[in-house]
Image (cartoon, helix red, strand yellow):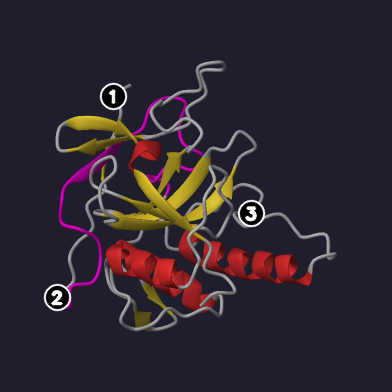
Amino acid sequence: MTASRLRLACALLAAGAGCSSASLAARRSLPPPPASADRAGAPEAGGAGPAHATGRDPDAASRNREARVAVETASSLVGRRSLTVGGVDWGAGCTALVRVSMARAGHPLPPAVTDAAGLHAWAERRGALRAGRRLEPGDVVFLADRPGGAPAHAGLVARADPDGTAVVLHRVARGVARVRLNLAWPTRTNDPATGRLVNDTLYVGRQAVPAGNLVVGVADLFGRS
C-alpha cells in the first residue's frame, strides 16, 4: 500500500497567526494510526481524554477535567480546516487549535499569543514548560521545522499510551489531523523490540524525520494561564 502524505505546514493568517510557512509533511507507516486523518471527525476509541482522577488530589482532578474538555474540543475538529466553534472563527493556524481548545476548557490564552513561537515564549515565562519524555493528555507539544530548531508548530496531546507513544492533534494544511510521536525513541519510527510504530515520519523538505525528533518543548498550561 502506498503510504499517504500529510502536509504539516500551517497557513499563515493575515495577522501573522498560525504556523511557520516552511514545508513540513508527514508519511504514515503500517500499522495504521489510531484514527486515520481520512476518517474526519472520528472519535477516539474509549474517549480521547485522560483517565479519571482518584479524587485524592483536587488539583489533579481539576486538571484532568479541563484537559478532557480541551482534548474533546480539538478531537471534534479532526478533518476540518475551519476552526469555527460556537460561532467564533479562531483562525486557520495550528496555534488557533490550541487557543480554542484551551478557551473551551476555561483557560483562554492572551490575545497577543497568536503563533507557536509566541505561545512557547509565554509558556516559558509562566513556568509551564516541563522536562521529561512522558506526555499527558492536554499537554501542548511544540515542534520545529528541523531538529533542534525554533518552535514553529504547536499541537495538543490527545492520548498517551503506556509505552510513551502519544497521539497529537495538529492543524495541518488539509485540516486537523492526528500525528503520532514518542519522546523515548525520538530518532526511530518503530520500537526496536516490538516493531510497533512510535513516530510518524515527517518530511522537512525532502528529508524524512521521525516526529519525536522535531519536538522542542512540552508545556502544561492548565492552572498557569
225, above or below 51, in the image: below
Estimate the x, y position of residue 72 in percent, counting from the top left: 55, 63
Amino acid carrying label 3: it is Gly
Mark 1, residue position: 2
Q: CA distance from mark 1 to mark 2?
A: 36 Å
- Mark 2 touches mark 3? (CB < 8 Å): no
Q: Between 158 and 152, which is closer to the camera in this rendering?
A: 152
The secondary structure that most of the magenta stretch takes on is: loop
- Mark 1 touches mark 2? (CB < 8 Å): no
Over which residues does the magenta segment extend? 14-39
Q: Between 136 and 30, which is closer to the camera in this rendering?
A: 136
39, above or below 69, in the image: above
Q: CA distance from mark 2 to mark 3?
A: 35 Å
Label disc, if present, on residue 14 of the rendered structure? 2
Tell me the SS state at disc 3.
loop
Which of label 2 and label 3 is nearer to you?
2
Q: CA distance from mark 3 to mark 1?
A: 30 Å
Label disc, if present, on residue 47 of the rendered structure? 3
